[in-house]
Amino acid sequence: MTFKFISFVALCAVFGPGVAAAQVLEVSGATTVQRRVLEPGAEPLKTATGIQLKVMGPGTGKGMLALFDGKVSVAAAGENLEDAVASAKAAAAETGRAVNVPANLVYHQIASDNIVVAVHANNPVKSLGRQQIKDMMTGKIKNWKQVGGPDLPVKLYAAAAGQAVRTAVQKGFMDGADYPPETTDIRTAIEQLRVIAGEPGAIGAMSEPIIKAGPEKVHVVAGATIPRPLGFVTVGAPSPAAQKMIDYFRSTEGQKQIR
């Protein structure tokens, strides 16, 4: 998707100098958007627009539920709108609550991302085909020796229900299948990176930029990736503050802040 970027100078002219009183904007949702966009861009955004971010990262699904409930005016989504709604329904199902999805949701893409398959750094398996990935993530392949690796049981670590990565992986790698009962669900991408780095038999799918920026070392196997958009969701047109944030992160200067 191509954006018409707005220059930093033009933004300052529109939004005024950074010395203006800060206006707080609450955003809840995807941890990938939090880590890659909101955290590195928070101070430059405040300087350019006067918008001060308050960021919560419970995952796309819970962020969308907070948006539906009117607790925040913006949800951060690590997937497209259709999948973000599906993540919200999955998060709601975990707690047994009903979901009333607004009919006028609007998606605002600001970046893109790749989901890749990560294993322990010492795992000698260099690549996996899509069918092998599917069979490992659905529990059909249970030992690494079945794909040319060591004689180790496969330890599957997945993003928890309601997170964008889980929805994307089930759709892109697993043909919509469920994870097997022995899967360990992980709440955040950083925690998933940590456990994969510490478990020789581990495998999991996660954001490639998060892996590159993280403190833990893992091995990304070749063979398959899932591209996905990163963006914000609003109910109807964005509020003035939300529009300023969206415009900033779509600008040339804002794009430089994305990690």
Image: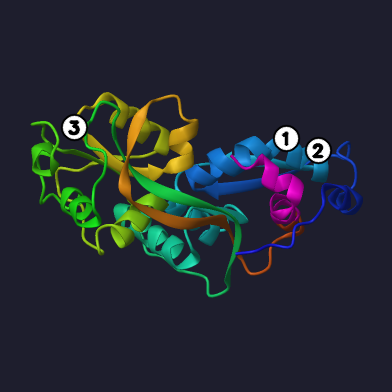
| Structural distance between the alpha carbons of marks 2 and 3 | 46 Å
Q: Quadrant of the N terminus?
A: bottom right
> Which numbered disc covers residue 104?
none
Closer to the eye: label 1 or 3 = 3
Indicate the position of residue 36 as horizontal and vertical percent values.
Answer: 56, 41
| Structural distance between the alpha carbons of marks 1 and 2 | 6 Å
| Structural distance between the alpha carbons of marks 1 and 3 | 40 Å
Name the amino acid type tagged 1: Glu
Instruction: Tell me the quarter of the picture where residue 190 sits.
Output: top left
Residue at left 29%, top 31%? 196
Q: Secondary structure at mark 1?
A: helix
- Vertical arrangement, residue 161 with respect to residue 42, above or below: below
Q: Is the residue marked by circle 2 packed among few (<14), some (14-19), or many (20+) residues within 10 Å?
A: some
Magenta segment includes 53: no
In the picture provided, is 155 more to the left or to the right than 243? left
> Disc 1 marks which residue?
43
In the picture provided, is 196 more to the left or to the right than 254? left
> Disc 2 marks which residue?
47
Q: Toward the viewer: 204 or 123?
A: 123
Q: Main secondary structure of the magenta part?
A: helix
> Disc 3 marks which residue?
201
Residues tagged 1 and 2 counted as in contact (Cβ below 8 A) = yes
- Vertical arrangement, residue 135 with respect to residue 202, above or below: below
Residues shaded magenta:
244-259
Name the amino acid type tagged 3: Gly
Name the amino acid type tagged 2: Thr
Indicate the position of residue 6 as horizontal and vertical percent values.
Answer: 79, 56
